[in-house]
Image: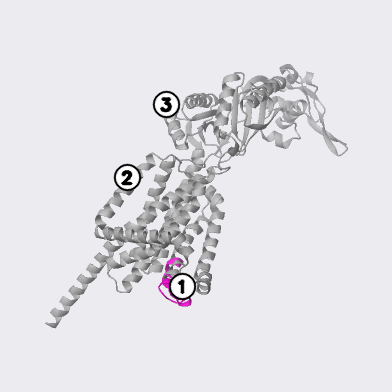
Amino acid sequence: LENITTHIERGTKPKSAAVYATNEVSISIIASTLTLLAVFIPLTMVGGMAGEIFRQLGWIVAIISSVSTIAALTLTPMMSSQLLRLKNRKTKGFDKFYGHIEKALGALDAVYAKALNWTVRHRITVILTATALFIVSLFLFNIVPTEFFPQQDNARLQMTVKLPINTRSEITKELSFRIYEQFRRDFPEIEAMTFTVGQASEDNVYGQLGDNGSHIMTGNIRLSLKTERERSIQEISDAMREDLRRYYPEIRTFDVVGAGMGGPFGGQTTVDLEIYGNDFTTTDAIAAQLADLMESVPGTSQVTVSRDEYAPEYLVNFDREKLAEHGLNISTASQFVRNRINGATASYYREEGDEYYIKVRYAPEFRQTLEDVQNILIYNSQGESVRVRDIAAIGETMQPPTIDRKDRERIVTVTCVAAKGAALSDLVEAASQQIDKVDIPPEIMVSIAGSYEDQQESFKDLAMLMIPILILVYIVMAAQFESFTSPFIIMFSVPFALTGVLAGLAVSGTALGIMSMVGLMMLFGIVVKNGIVLIDYIVLCRERGMSIMEAVVTSGRSRLRPILMTAMTTIFGMLPLAVGRGVGAEMWNGLGITVASGLTISTLVTLFLIPAIYSLSAERADKRKQRKAERRQRRALKETN
């Protein structure tokens, strides 16, 4: 559209201007779209967690880019030929409102032309300065922290409080009411708070999935919206954890997390220290030591150990020989003991559409003590009875309620939750230092997992995807330009997109996360568009007989406005994402900052560094051609003589 308008202002008829201007820029438009497709179509094929998150984004951008390109090459020229007209006499309103803007744009063109003229005459200085700037920007990796997904504020919290095992439900309930009253008094942001206490019934499948018991209290808290309160959800949860530690010493462990944040998508930042080993005593000691060390690390808000408090149990060890003497086997004997204590469902009772289990088991007074278990009668197939104490050794023991395994190995996990303002990379570094302080036996292995493990996996997938994307972008441009040199020059704008990204993240204090990585991949297709437009017009000017210097300056001045328009529309479109503070805005802040800052720096590189590199490369290519021509002439003269 800008090129059509320029030709009409030069006096060309609208229909001719539409055809001629579209032909001038059609190759660069198609090449720009193909580079975008080269970025986003591979994004639809990536596997793992990153693929699940961004597959739809890749398809949507690819489809929209294709449709918009078709419209730009067909619908826009047609409508321009019918609607645009050259107005020789401009109205007073036009001069009043647009005259100043036109003068400013004209002055900008003149200033840029002078700056570009200086750039191509001092190109070595410009190239060396840009290279030094890029190298210095890489040191920002030491400043910019990393994360997986940003912590989101969805105004919901979940709380689990555990007292010593076998605590009566009445005591747990009384504590729950105390916590409820104190939280409602000290946290005015709470709009609603509910809690449950006790053991879930056997027909409550959902309740059985979570932690439950007479010593466990689980609560759900709904806060006011993020925009209606001063404190963030991280600050509130940190304050709640501090209150639970300070005012309730009877609590054994507690866990306060954002509701729905158990997964990696925008939830709390956690670092898991996974301890592998078969010996319970050794792994428990290492877990306790690491938990104590991590509690003292600044930026750690909560530390929990996955292995729960050991529970007292009766261990029944059957003697196989004695079982055989009485015509029994382990399966039958263990089933008898289980049914006498836990009960067996004998039938169902139905009333008014409700169904109730009818369970048969010993009365409570006959299944409480060790002696009660020893006196349980077991019958064989002949109807003969034998007591458990006659065929088994029974003793009391302490065992963990559950034994967690990963990769078929026993595991205990120390989970560290990051406080507000703490980055994942800082917490991982601190965890590594604390692990080095612990004396770990050779049969025990400790590794760092949690959000860090998910981050490393996704970063690896995206980093591996960047290589074929860059190759595809280069191949597409090489096919369009029918040259290897011009696409190579345009690709110099890509590294400086990284410079802009690191600078933007460092200035804003934002961590480099998965959304920033996706934004960086988007820049691969966006930043080369301006270079394609500029280099394509330079080649066109040279084909019209201009010298290298003249073609570079003329093309730069002619393409300045289209380049600035496309860059600024994208940057301004990303600003709401970059500075948004509404509900859910945390997820998109990194993406907006990445694209806006990266495109800003790469646009400056396109306007100055790319012309400098092109002019240097073109002059050397012309000199090589001239030397080859001179050598051919000398050979021809020698052959003639």
**Residue at horizontal 72 percent and vertical 37 percent from the top:** 205
Q: Nearer the viewer, mark 2 or mark 1?
A: 1
The residue lying furthest to the left in this view is: 641
* Type of amino acid under label 1: Leu
Residue closer to the observer: 30 or 232:
232
Q: Earlier in the sequence, mark 3 or mark 2?
A: 2
State whether residue 433 is above or below residue 113.
above
State whether residue 39 is above or below residue 403.
below
The percent position of residue 544, horizontal first and vertical second, equals: 32, 74
The quarter of the picture where residue 176 lies is: top right
The percent position of residue 257, horizontal first and vertical second, equals: 59, 33
- Decide: marks 2, 1 in contact (CB < 8 A)? no
- Decide: marks 3, 1 in contact (CB < 8 A)? no
Which numbered disc covers residue 437? 3
The residue tagged 1 is 86
The residue tagged 2 is 136
Whether residue 365 is visible: yes
CA gap, disc 2 to disc 1?
A: 50 Å
The percent position of residue 17, horizontal first and vertical second, equals: 45, 74
In this picture, which residue range is highlighted in magenta? 7-30
Q: Main secondary structure of the magenta part?
A: helix
